[in-house]
Amino acid sequence: MMRQIKLIWDFRGPAGAKTAEHHEIHLKEYIQIEKLPLNITGFEEITDMHAIAWMVVNESDMITVRDALKPHRGEVYEG
């Protein structure tokens, strides 16, 4: 199985959770527009001042998506 990468965007401040939730909508739109093979996204409130939005891509698509969407960080996705 191909390795999968979780690309992560950090949002900080009191509006971070709402911003992360909204950002996930745009990640889903990007997946549809680009016809990516995976449709795994989410958002999480880490603390009341830090939230993340994320999407999972195949390692072979990571460079293209990273360059287009500029995530803050990434990690290997364990599903």
Image (cartoon, helix red, strand yellow):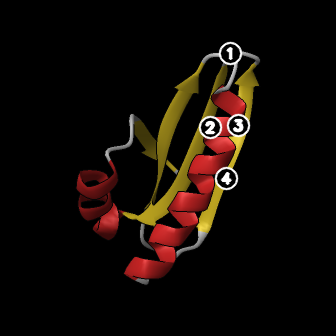
- Mark 2 lies on a secondary structure that is helix
Cβ atoms at labels 2 and 4 below 8 Å apart: no
Report how far apart the C-alphas of labels 4 and 3 lie in the structure. 13 Å
Q: Earlier in the sequence, mark 4 or mark 1?
A: 4
Q: Earlier in the sequence, mark 1 or mark 3?
A: 3
Residue 78: percent from the left, percent from the top? 60, 53
Which label is found at residue 18? 3
| Residue bearing mark 1 | 49
Q: Amino acid at mark 3?
A: Lys
Give the mark toward the camera: 1 or 3: 3
Cβ atoms at labels 2 and 3 below 8 Å apart: yes
Report how far apart the C-alphas of labels 1 and 3 lie in the structure. 11 Å
Q: Residue at x 62, y 16 (%)?
A: 13
Which label is found at residue 19? 2
Q: Nearer the viewer, residue 70 or 3?
A: 70
Report how far apart the C-alphas of labels 2 and 4 lie in the structure. 12 Å
Q: Residue at x 32, y 60 (%)?
A: 65
Q: Earlier in the sequence, mark 4 or mark 3?
A: 3
Report how far apart the C-alphas of labels 1 and 2 lie in the structure. 11 Å
Relative side of 14 to 61, left or right: right
Q: Earlier in the sequence, mark 1 or mark 2?
A: 2
Label tally: 4
Q: Nearer the viewer, residue 3 or 21?
A: 21
Cβ atoms at labels 1 and 3 below 8 Å apart: no
Q: Is residue 37 visible?
A: no
Report how far apart the C-alphas of labels 2 and 3 lie in the structure. 4 Å
Neighbor class of circle 3 (other Cα within 10 Å; few <14, some 14-19, many 20+) is few
Q: Residue at x 67, y 52 (%)?
A: 42
Give the mark toward the camera: 1 or 2: 2
Which label is found at residue 42? 4
- Mark 4 lies on a secondary structure that is strand
